[in-house]
Image (cartoon, rainbow, N blue to C red):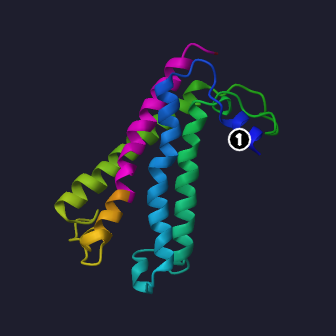
Amino acid sequence: MRAAWKAAHTPVAGVPRHARIAAAAIPFTVLPSCVWRLGVLFVDHSAADSGTLPGWLPLDVYIVVLSVFSELLALTALGLVAAWGEVVPRRIPFLGGRRIPVAAVVVPAALGALALTALWTVLTAVTQVAGTTIQGDPLPADFPSEAGGWSSVWFYVCYAPLMLWGPLLGVVTVAYWRRRRHMP
């Protein structure tokens, strides 16, 4: 297992040190918020806590799926420094062994970096400072940042690192583009 992990995540030649560090840091910027969310599973909550979720989607399932999905998405940043971000792994039928076009990686990664930066800037700078939800409504009294004390501290400690996800992804994307821009 360790050999497979190392083979899949070892940086390719020419990856700058700062890009390796940033790519490795990205999953750790997302992990605290996942831990915080999963902690909600162990707290009593009512159907009203589901907010605008569709009735067919239980809150517990949503929390687990969102946490797993966001962490897997964060792990894709490692592809910007590893071989599997440049060449499709051989085990993939029909495409295995082919070079991945630079634009096919850089465009979604750059858009993702911009979207994540904008999203977390809006969610933190605008909503938290203004004391409103994304829709502009006042934050409810039971919102985690409004609880006060250690609950609020824990919330901010877990969610503040998300503000780094977009900028770090941007750094890794630029390094990927610089390294691969002259490659076929």
Q: Secondary structure at mark 1?
A: helix
The residue lying at 30 percent from left, 56 percent from top is 123
Q: Amino acid at mark 1?
A: Trp
In the displayed structure, 146 sits above or below 47; it is above
* Residue 5: quarter of image: top right
Q: State the residue in front, 63 or 144.
A: 144
Q: Main secondary structure of the magenta part?
A: helix
Q: Which image quadrant: the N terminus?
A: top right
Looking at the picture, how far across and down is residue 65, in whole percent? Answer: 57, 65
Looking at the picture, how far across and down is residue 128, in whole percent? Answer: 23, 60
* Residue 99: quarter of image: top right
In the displayed structure, 41 sits above or below 135; it is below
* Residue 90: quarter of image: top right
Q: Which image quadrant: the C terminus?
A: top right
Q: State the residue in front, 40 or 85.
A: 40
- Name the residue carrying label 1: 5
The residue lying at 78 percent from left, 28 percent from top is 97
Q: State the residue in front, 181 or 155.
A: 155
Callout 1 crowding tier (Cα within 10 Å): few <14, some 14–19, many ≥20: few
Q: Is residue 61 magenta?
A: no
Magenta region, residue range? 158-183
Looking at the picture, how far across and down is residue 25, in whole percent? Answer: 48, 41
